Image: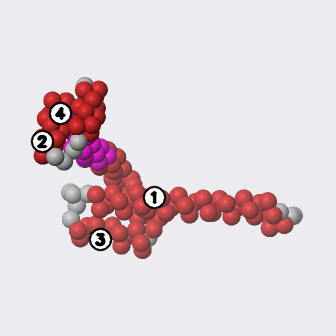
């Protein structure tokens, strides 16, 4: 009977399989820990117990958490994404506040009257304001 170790391809395949399983395991831990810290319905002591359980009994603790809280995890993730999207939209709206062309021209006129800009610069600003409308 031929041993599996005499085939280098099988050794490489086995190593790749183990490495892939390890990467998936790390990803699952990140998902679980991020969900634990995102939860507001669980106290700090319960979170610490889950973390200790996952560290002491890694596979069993992670699988129990995934089975027990799988539905809540998806809902919390979607809620987190919605909050991030709302914050981004609010930021974009605050930065890209639309101004009325008349307001832009009035500001440029006040800058011209104050001597901050020249007549040529005023004409350029006026042209940009009118072109943007």
Residue 82 marker: none
Disc 4 designates what residue? Answer: 105
Mark 4 or 3, which is nearer the eye? 4
- In the rendered structure, which segment of residues is drawn in magenta? 81-99
Q: Is residue 76 above or below residue 119?
A: below
Can you say which quadrant of the picture contains the C terminus? top left
Where disc 1 sits, the SS reads helix
Q: Position of residue 23 (x, y in %)?
A: 55, 61
Mark 2 or 1, which is nearer the eye? 2
Q: Is-magenta flag for residue 129? A: no
- Evaluate whether residue 86 shows in this view: no
Numbered circles on residues, count: 4
Disc 1 designates what residue? Answer: 28
Q: Earlier in the sequence, mark 3 or mark 2?
A: 3
Q: Earlier in the sequence, mark 3 or mark 1?
A: 1
* Quadrant in the picture for residue 118: top left
Dominant SS type (magenta)? helix
Q: Is residue 101 above or below residue 56?
A: above
* Quadrant in the picture for residue 62: bottom left
Can you say which quadrant of the picture contains the N terminus? bottom right
Disc 3 designates what residue? Answer: 48
Q: Gap in Å between the C-alphas at discs 3 and 2?
A: 65 Å
Is there CB contact under 8 Å for labels 3 and 2? no
Where disc 2 sits, the SS reads helix
Which residue is found at the position 16% from the left and 46% from the top? 115
Q: Earlier in the sequence, mark 2 or mark 1?
A: 1
Q: Gap in Å between the C-alphas at discs 4 and 2?
A: 12 Å
Q: Is residue 61 left or right of residue 133?
A: right
Residue 113 marker: 2
Q: Is residue 70 above or below residue 93?
A: below
């Amino acid at each position: 009977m031929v041993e599996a170790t005499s085939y280098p391809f099988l050794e490489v395949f086995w190593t790749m399989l183990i490495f892939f399983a390890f990467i998936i395991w790390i990803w699952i831990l990140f998902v679980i820990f991020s969900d634990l810290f995102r939860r507001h319905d669980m106290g700090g002591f319960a979170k610490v117990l889950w973390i200790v359980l996952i560290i002491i009994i890694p596979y069993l603790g992670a699988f129990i958490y995934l089975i027990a809280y799988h539905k809540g995890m998806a809902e919390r993730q979607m809620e987190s994404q919605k909050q991030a999207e709302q914050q981004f939209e609010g930021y974009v709206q605050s930065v890209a506040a639309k101004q009325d062309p008349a307001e832009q021209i009035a500001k440029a006129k006040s800058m011209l009257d104050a001597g901050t800009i020249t007549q040529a610069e005023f004409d350029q600003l006026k042209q940009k304001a009118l072109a943007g409308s």
